[in-house]
Amino acid sequence: MNMRHDHTKWLTHFVRDRIPEQDFPGQTEEEYLYYAGGEVDQDACAFDVLSAIIRLGGIRPGYSFRKDRTTIYGGQPAICATEMPLYSFADYARSRSDSGKVSAYGIAFLKSEFYEAGGRPAIYGLSQDNIQMVRNEPTCRILPDDVLPVAEQYRYVAYNPSSTSSWIDWSHEREWRWIPQDPDKDEVWVVDHNGIMGPTPALPLFKGKLDGRPFTKVCLIVWTKEEADRVQEMLTGFYLAGSNNYGTPFDRKLIEKSKIIILSDIIASVENGKKLEAQTIEGLEAANLIHSIKISPPPKNAAKVVENAIKLAAKAAKKAQAEFFAKHGRGNGYCGFAHATTTDVTNPMVQYMLDKNLAAGPFDGRVWISVPLGREQSLDYNEAGCIAAAASLTKSLGINVFVETRYD
């Protein structure tokens, strides 16, 4: 058992708010959009960036641009992680919250499993100074091979703690880095800046041990209880679905073992509660500071309650569609579909309906409840019935049910 508070078995990949003018250099709009991608807004906040990692099932390598050039050497992007204990980083992030370079959101994984996946500790500094680079371009900086083999250059971090004019020292971050090892395994599917879906290199954490990957659990790090609840809903949804909307598999065993950490609770526990064990992820369970996904057994009367709720919803929908038909016929607008939808995947009644095939999904956290409706080509006609059904289900089941439409 690890008893040191300055050492941990975990590595953490922290994310921050996107800063367009720093993160996405390029001489043309096409280059700019290429680096920005199509999955999150160009100026997305750190929580949205973390949510995208969860939703996509893994972390994509980055160039870590500074002053319009990559800080990753060797000619390819990498994933960076820190070995700093959780409280140490929380305090560090708090002290640099206005710098735009550090945030309190991230995803942690076991060091041993990251190593097995190909991750290695960073190399701080070299034995030689004033090295002439072989290539020094915005996205490709390569050192001479006799200084450091190209295959290892992604690990290099510039280091000069003695200079007064060009001081640089990031060694306190205890950084590790990773580059893709197997193009057939190290990938997730994404939508790019042109709206085209396809595979892209990534560390596929949520595949767990599927496809021969080594990961058994992760920890998601957020700042507030409200954000933790949102992450809990996302993880629970992917646990129930077994994959995301792009077909990327999610290992249920990994999600079962994964935890959610509220960083503000860590700071309060250490500073106010004097719980030193809460400085590391290993000590959080003893300090009662971790949260997990929410799979709840249904109440004993679930079958009767759901059956009655669906009958009432179907009756309300039939009445609403009859009224619509009396006024508008079958409708002359667009063709399409309407679904009675909920995002409350942690609710035991919703989980019961999914288990009994009375609902479909989750689709990125959205569940379509199966209600017998009169179906026509008209979207307006279908929507009229679905609105009534959703209102009835909300009342009967005590959950928020809304209407989701899509064109045919």
Image: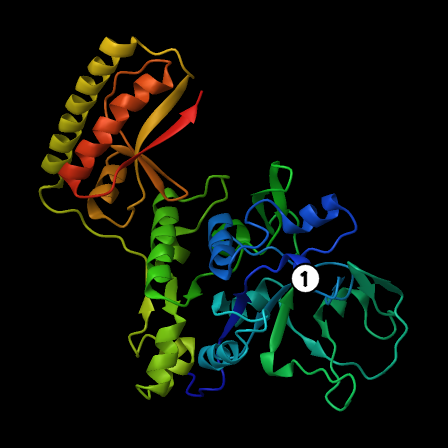
* Tag 1 residue: 22
Task: Judge whether 240 appears above or below 229 on screen.
Answer: above
Horizontal arrangement in the rendering, residue 87 relative to residue 131 (left or right): left
Task: Judge whether 204 appears above or below 175 on screen.
Answer: above
Q: Amino acid at mark 1?
A: Gln
Task: Judge whether 360 appears above or below 376 on screen.
Answer: below
Q: Position of residue 131 (x, y in %)?
A: 88, 76
At x 48%, y 80%, the residue is 85
Q: How is the image coloured?
A: rainbow
Query: How crowded is the residue under tag 1: few (<14 C-alpha within 10 Å), some, or many (20+)?
Result: few
Q: Position of residue 93 (x, y in %)?
A: 51, 76
| Quarter occupied by the N terminus | bottom left
Q: Is residue 85 among what the camera can see?
A: yes
Q: Nearer the viewer, residue 195 or 211?
A: 195
Q: Is residue 179 among what the camera can see?
A: no
| Quarter occupied by the C terminus | top left
Q: Position of residue 51 (x, y in %)?
A: 46, 54
At x 51%, y 61%, the residue is 46
At x 26%, y 39%, the residue is 355
Horizontal arrangement in the rendering, residue 386 relative to residue 377 (left or right): left
